[in-house]
Image (cartoon, rainbow, N blue to C red):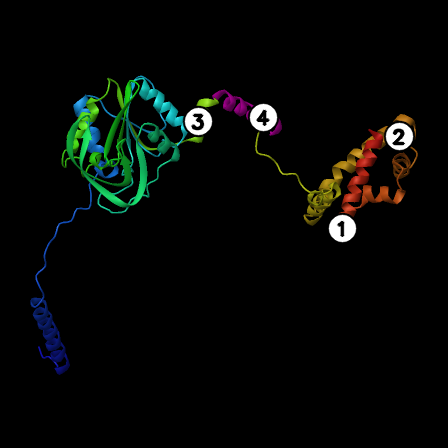
Amino acid sequence: MAICGKELVMILLRHACLLFLLAFLTQCEKTVEKEREIGYLGKARANPFLAWERFVEKQQGKAVVTQSTWPVLDEDRSMIFCTADPLSTDLQLEQIGAWVKKGGHAVVFLDRFELQQSDWSSWSRPQELPDALVEWAKGMGVELKLSDAEKSHTEAQFLGESYQVDMRSKVSMKDENQCDQPVISLTMGDGRVTWIVDASMMRNRWIDQKQHIDLIGDLLDCRDDGEILFLRGVGISFLALVWEKGRMVVVGFGILIAAWLLTHLPRFGPMQNALREDQIRAYDHHLEMIGDFHWRLDRCASLLAPLRTEVQELCQQWQMKHGRLDERLFDVIASRAELPVDRVERAMTDLRARDPLILIRMVADLQSIRKTFV
């Protein structure tokens, strides 16, 4: 096959570009593969405390009871893990304080307890300490403060034992001797309250580091037999509080609303909107439409003939009954119906009305005449 000069130039140009690219790529540096952790998959990604929950279930032989609303504190529950957020009112602190005095163990975490927080991200929700919680801790001899700088802790003390930990928090927690401590455990009545500045030792990423698992195991051993409650993302629900404290009032108010609706709303079908007066068509307008319909279809004879026949028979029967057969039919009808004779003649004899209005008048006259002889 013959190749023209232009095609040959294009082929050479393509090969030259290909050679240039190959030469350029050979001068590039070799790539280096690096592995970077981006997080867990599956249930561990949605629940950063999944490993801790499974450890508790394996060690204690029962599953952790997770809850997102304020619980009912009874004797069946022996231990509660929660954050500082739900402990923001005096009422909740009184309830959990009374429960602890009866033998419960409350573990309060002050930082990194959020489910939405990523363990591979430096971002975290700004920490807050409710005033009621600060005063409650102060009554136990624990001073809680927030600082701008994050402080690290490598050692924690719990019931006389020392543990190697990796905790970081902006919350400063001091004991009676004004020493910063990552863990403080105090007795209250027959129970115990344990304060921990950082909940990262329970999260999936750090639970197997240092001596976190040993500290968790000793925490779990320091309790009576009963359920272990895990409050995550807990908040105050106004509706739940109303239902718990005023259930009968809510039920009565609902019955009252239902009774009002039954007495004020229609029982069947949807509500109908009232028509305005200008939207209501008069009866004579409907008659005009009916007359116009029959007149356009040229059905005047079929409409008038039955009425005329009936009127004529009724009038003749009346004449025979009263002995007036010798009188003219139209005159008798006019005098009896109190109508002009010309209107009676037109109603009884006109074959086709000139317009719809005349047709309507003829039908109306025949109806009135019929009523006088019935």
Judge depth for marks 2 and 4 and give the one in front.
4
Q: Which mark is residue 36?
A: none
Q: Main secondary structure of the magenta part?
A: helix
Judge depth for marks 1 and 2 and give the one in front.
1
- Mark 2 is on which residue type? Gln
Residues packed near mark 4 inside 10 Å, few (<14), some (14 to 19) or many (20 plus): few
* CA distance for labels 3 and 4: 29 Å
Q: Tell me where residue 299 appears, x and y as whole percent.
A: 70, 45
Judge depth for marks 4 and 1 and give the one in front.
4
In the rendered structure, the answer to whether residue 24 lies left or right of residue 169 reads: left
* CA distance for labels 1 and 2: 33 Å
- Mark 1 is on which residue type? Asp
The residue furthest bottom is 5
Would you name the residue on which mark 2 appears?
A: 319
Secondary structure beneath label 2: helix
Residue positioned 77% across, 36% down in the render: 307
- Mark 4 is on which residue type? Leu
Contact (CB < 8 A) between labels 2 and 4?
Answer: no
In the rendered structure, the answer to whether residue 22 lies left or right of residue 284 reads: left
* CA distance for labels 4 and 1: 53 Å
Would you name the residue on which mark 1 appears?
A: 355
Secondary structure beneath label 4: helix
Q: Quadrant of residue 24?
A: bottom left
The mark nearer the N terminus, 4 or 1, is 4
Q: Tell me where residue 50 appears, x and y as whole percent.
A: 22, 33
Would you name the residue on which mark 3 appears?
A: 241
Looking at the rendering, the stretch of residues picked out in magenta corresponds to 247-267
Would you name the residue on which mark 4 appears?
A: 262
The mark nearer the N terminus, 3 or 4, is 3
